Image: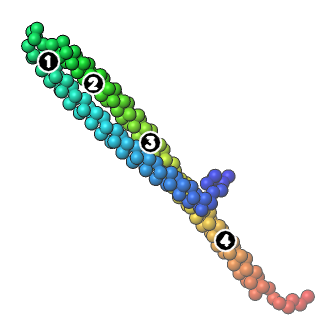
Amino acid sequence: MAEPSLRLSPQAAGQLVTLRQRRATEARQLLSAATSQVDQRLGILTHACQVLSTHQAHQLQVRAEISSRPQDALVSAVLLRRDHEHTEELARHEKRLKDKVAQAERDVEKARQLAAATRRLLMQYEQREKQARDLLERVVTERRTAQERREEQDIAELAMMRQSSARLTRQRRTTPRHSVP
């Protein structure tokens, strides 16, 4: 029984290799883009963390200034209200910055997951590409082997025909041409 790969022409196997190479190349490009996106998201996260850290340092400084003021009757209600509003605004801003950091962390995680999935996809495509190359090699080898067998069979048949021809020729030479009864 013939191997399934014998039914596949070398051209078809070559086209399969080309298709698999193209898919692997596309997956490499996707992985490059996904890796770049991870780097970009990490940059955004780093920046958001730096902004939050700077804000928190400023917030601590403002609170220290407020608490270092003398607490006496001379401090007006307007000043106290302004300080309170300022600290509340700083706290709201800190909350927004923390939300941005949390969102940036989620974005980084999603980008890493996408890059990991793309990496797995690339490995699958590379494996399929290798399988296609192996199939092409097997098809070409099987075709060559089949061709060699046919040639050997043709040579063997020619040798048998020559032997038969030589035997007939010898028989004709040894048999008298004119037999007298």
* Disc sitting over residue 94 in the figure: 2
Disc 1 marks a residue whose amino acid type is Ile
Q: For the point 14% across and 18% down, which residue is it?
A: 66
Residue carrying label 1: 66
Near mark 1 (Cα within 10 A), the count class, few <14, some 14-19 or many ≥20, is some
Image position, residue 152 (x, y; %):
62, 69
Residue carrying label 3: 118
Judging depth in this view, the residue of 167 and 33 nearest the camera is 33
Of pointers 2 and 3, the one earlier in the residue sequence? 2
Disc number lying in front (2 or 3): 2
Disc number lying in front (3 or 4): 3
Residue carrying label 4: 154
Disc 2 marks a residue whose amino acid type is Glu
Of pointers 1 and 2, the one earlier in the residue sequence? 1
Q: CA distance from mark 3 to mark 1?
A: 53 Å
Disc 4 marks a residue whose amino acid type is Asp
Disc number lying in front (1 or 4): 1
Contact, mark 1 vs mark 2 (Cβ under 8 Å)? no
Looking at the image, which residue sits at the far top?
Answer: 73
Judging depth in this view, the residue of 21 and 90 nearest the camera is 90
Q: For the point 24% across and 18% down, which residue is it?
A: 85
* Disc sitting over residue 86 in the figure: none
Image position, residue 154 (x, y; %):
67, 71
Dividing the picture into quarters, in which one does residue 45 lie? top left
Q: CA distance from mark 1 to mark 2?
A: 18 Å
Q: CA distance from mark 4 to mark 2?
A: 89 Å
Judging depth in this view, the residue of 131 and 81 nearest the camera is 81
Answer with left or right where residue 26 lies relative to residue 104: right
Disc number lying in front (4 or 2): 2
Q: Give the structural element (helix, strand or loop) at label 3.
A: helix
Image position, residue 111 (x, y; %):
39, 37
